[in-house]
Amino acid sequence: MTTIGRLRRLSASALLAGFLTGLCLRAEEGAPPEAQAPKTAGLEIDVKKLEVRADATVCLDAGILEYLACLPDTFEHEALFRVRCKPSELHLGLLLIGLKPCPIDPLGLWRRKARDTSRSRVRIEVEYEQEGKKQRLGLSRLLVNRRQRSAAVPDAWVFTGSFFGRRGDRRVYAADVAGGVIGLGQDDASVLQLGEDLGNPYQGDEQGLEVDTNTVPAKGTPVQLIVTPHRPEAREKPEPGAAGAEIPPG
């Protein structure tokens, strides 16, 4: 096994071990019985609903994409969203709702493997407020497939996970340093990836993805990215003419 492979294998167990340590500390402090998971800045983990929510902001409303989400001051010029949470904490949240990373490999075989690994496939939705009403729609609906513009972007998101490495004398989670959070298969350090190879937008006008200017919320709009286990039967039912499925008042 390669060094990178060993690092990837260690990543999930190390993150989970850290969480278990946190659980012990919380128990000693008298955590309430309904407590599910630690709260971190910009991230909500709901183990019962099998749902992870990450606070984000729309940072691009037109143009080609190299990432779907990134950390502040990294790839905002080529990413749709900027997130607040640390990628390592997002990785932990996905483990806590029962997901299993399917690491990227140099030959691209991970895409085929992910199709057969249900615990690695996820659904990503975007929730935001528009004209006083909450909207919720699949992430893919904000994107345009440049290879075949009339075709829908596949809802094929995969929890690949990042990996641990060294930065000087510190052991770091790669995505926390690199800044990519949701990638398009070009960067193996991102936590989540698109599981279809649609090409690199910098290598041709008919490759990769770009922002769908007809559906994307305005630049600067606060949103929540909602990650749940993939369920084949899940289908959106937006109102006719609406950008997304309106959420009825709770």
Image (cartoon, helix red, strand yellow):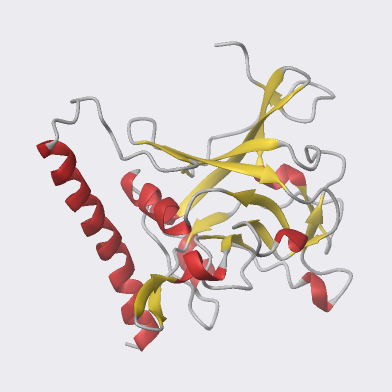
Horizontal side, residue 180 vs residue 78: left or right: left
Q: Name which residue lies at 36% across and 57% down.
A: 100
x and y percentages locating residue 197 in the rendered image: 66, 68
Quadrant in which the C terminus is drawn: top right
Q: Name which residue lies at 36% across and 80% down.
A: 5
Q: As rendered, which of 13 and 110 lies closer to the eye?
A: 13
x and y percentages locating residue 150 in the rendered image: 86, 51
- Rendering quarter of residue 67: bottom right
- Reply above or below: 242 against 206: above
- Rendering quarter of residue 70: bottom right
**Farthest residue, direction top:** 249
Q: Name which residue lies at 84% across and 61% down.
A: 146
Quadrant in which the N terminus is drawn: bottom left
x and y percentages locating residue 3 in the rendered image: 35, 87
Q: Name which residue lies at 75% across and 73% down.
A: 200
- Rendering quarter of residue 69: bottom right
Horizontal side, residue 117 vs residue 185: left or right: left
x and y percentages locating residue 245 in the rendered image: 69, 25
Q: Is residue 194 visible?
A: no
Q: Is residue 29 visible?
A: yes
Q: As rendered, which of 161 and 22 lies closer to the eye?
A: 22
